[in-house]
Image: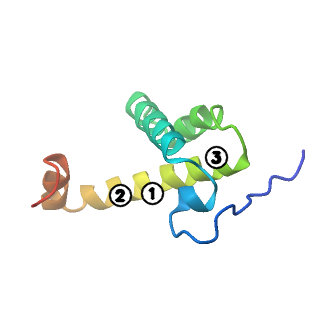
Amino acid sequence: MENLIVTVVNTESTKVSDLLGISEERNEELAELISNEFAKNNSKVSVLENISKEAKNVNELAFLAFSLGSLVEHLSSLSSNPLAMLASMIGGLR
């Protein structure tokens, strides 16, 4: 197997997608992909397996894995805080 090496493309940004050279349009496509797969699957490993098939390069694969991990962490923190979950469901407090 070849080594997979993530390459930083834009060192001026703090956004992971920008750092990895992923356009805003592609970022949105990948976010929708994660959302759709997460809604269909109970297993995080199955979600990761399915979304990895859509990655065009190793940077996208790294971004997908990072995004999925962030989503799982966020959902886990919401489940331990019912008020935060409710606020998230109604679009946050204004």
Using the image, determine if residue 62 lies above or below residue 48: below
| Residue matched to label 3 | 60
Task: Tell me the residue at 57%/40% (across/down).
Answer: 48
Q: What residue type is labelled 3?
A: Glu
Does 47 sit left or right of 54 as displayed? left
Q: How far apart are marks 1 and 2 (CA)?
A: 6 Å
Q: Distance between the residues labelled 3 and 1?
A: 15 Å
Circles 3, 2 touching at the beta carbon (< 8 Å): no
| Residue matched to label 1 | 70
Q: How far apart are marks 3 and 2 (CA)?
A: 21 Å
Q: Is mark 3 on a helix, strand or loop?
A: helix
Q: Which amino acid does label 1 sit on?
A: Ser
Using the image, determine if residue 5 lies above or below residue 30: below
| Residue matched to label 2 | 74
Circles 1, 2 touching at the beta carbon (< 8 Å): yes
Q: Earlier in the sequence, mark 3 or mark 2?
A: 3
Q: Which of marks 3 and 1 is nearer the N terminus?
A: 3
Circles 3, 1 touching at the beta carbon (< 8 Å): no
Q: Nearer the viewer, residue 68 or 7?
A: 7
Q: Residue furthest right?
A: 1
Task: Tell me the residue at 41%/37% (across/down).
Answer: 35
Task: Say few, some or many: other residues with alpha carbon within 10 Å of mark 2 (under 14 / 14 to 19 / 20 or more).
Answer: few
Q: Nearer the viewer, residue 79 or 59?
A: 59
| Residue 76: x %, y % from top left | 34, 56
Q: Quadrant of the N terminus?
A: top right
Task: Tell me the residue at 40%/58% (across/down).
Answer: 73
Mark 3 vs mark 1: give the one in front.
3
Q: Nearer the viewer, residue 21 or 86?
A: 21
Q: Is mark 1 on a helix, strand or loop?
A: helix
Q: What residue type is labelled 2?
A: His
Q: In which quarter of the image is residue 93?
A: bottom left
